[in-house]
């Protein structure tokens, strides 16, 4: 099962993206309960509102709606585009960053890392309006995870729709380093249990993510 290997899935934020991480501010808002449903048409409607910067858009609902589209792939979309985007970030080639980031967003508009890359590129290219747009989307997506639970138990686990969401959330929001990962089940649902340490204090703790949606996707593919 591709989801269970911590070494294979270890996620690192490219150093260049730390420029925009400080712009992300997380404010509490109503969370989305695991098991909520949305249609592909609902995703298209929500996405159109996001692109118009509608302040009423629920990013948790957007993420869940995306899982009902043919493009949804919780274990990665275009790995070449992701690799090329990160190389362009490291090299300061910001037009190329936008090229590859937008390729990723064409497939997956809830890709947090791609929005952060766009924000950084636009900041370096002097387009503050577009920088702010992508920062606001990244903020909304991360906030929707933060308000889906508290991560302290399977019953209150953070709800994620992909593996990368787990790692980017731990890095950017919780500011912890994963040490040990295990897959557990409770009440017929799947959860990732992480033993983590705080990046500053080294204090250990345990975090739970609800990964039922990615696991249902795997079961569907295998059928």
Image: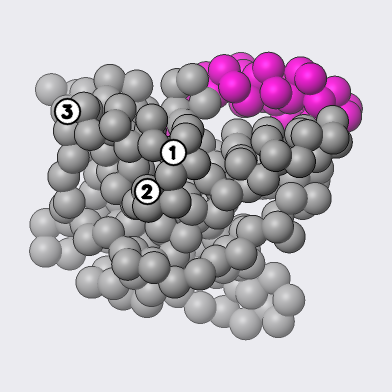
Residue sitting at 44 percent across and 51 percent down? 55
The alpha-carbon separation of the residues under discs 2 and 1 comes to 7 Å
Element at label 2? loop
| Mark 2 and mark 3 residues within 8 Å of each other at the beta carbon | no
Q: Is residue 159 magenta?
A: no
Structural crowding at the residue carrying mark 2, measured as other residues with C-alpha within 10 Å and reported as few (<14), some (14–19) or many (≥20): some
Residue drawn 63% across the image and 25% down it: 101
* Mark 2 → mark 3, Cα distance in angstroms: 29 Å
Along the viewing direction, whichever of 29 and 9 lies nearer the viewer: 29
Judge whether residue 91 is colored magenta.
Answer: yes
Disc number for residue 50:
1
* Range of residues picked out in magenta: 75-104
Residue 137: x percent and y percent? 53, 45
Whether residue 208 sits left or right of residue 26 in the image: it is left
Characterize the local packing of mark 1: few (<14), some (14-19) or many (20 or more) Cα atoms within 10 angstroms: many
Which label number is shown at residue 57? 2
Q: Position of residue 162 (x, y in %)?
A: 40, 42
Q: Which residue is labeled 3 in the image? A: 220
């Amino acid at each position: 099962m591709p989801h269970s290997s911590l070494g294979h899935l270890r996620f690192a934020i490219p150093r260049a993206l730390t420029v925009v991480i400080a712009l992300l501010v997380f404010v509490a808002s109503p969370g989305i309960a695991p098991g909520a449903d949305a249609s592909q048409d609902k995703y298209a409607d929500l996405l159109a509102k996001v692109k118009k910067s509608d302040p009423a858009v629920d990013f948790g609902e957007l993420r869940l709606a995306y899982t009902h589209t043919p493009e949804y792939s919780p274990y990665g979309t275009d790995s070449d585009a992701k690799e090329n985007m990160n190389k362009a970030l490291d090299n300061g080639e910001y037009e190329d960053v936008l090229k590859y980031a937008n390729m990723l967003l064409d497939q997956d508009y809830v890709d947090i890392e791609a929005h952060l890359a766009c924000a950084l590129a636009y900041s370096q290219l002097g387009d503050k309006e577009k920088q702010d747009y992508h920062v606001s989307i990244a903020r909304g997506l991360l906030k929707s995870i933060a308000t889906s639970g508290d991560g302290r138990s399977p019953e209150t686990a953070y709800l994620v729709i992909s593996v990368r969401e787990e790692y980017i959330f731990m890095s950017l929001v919780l500011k912890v380093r994963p040490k040990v990962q295990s897959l557990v089940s409770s009440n017929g649902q799947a959860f990732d249990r992480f033993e983590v340490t705080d990046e500053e204090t080294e204090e250990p703790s345990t975090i739970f993510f609800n990964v039922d949606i990615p696991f249902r996707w795997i079961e569907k593919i295998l059928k």
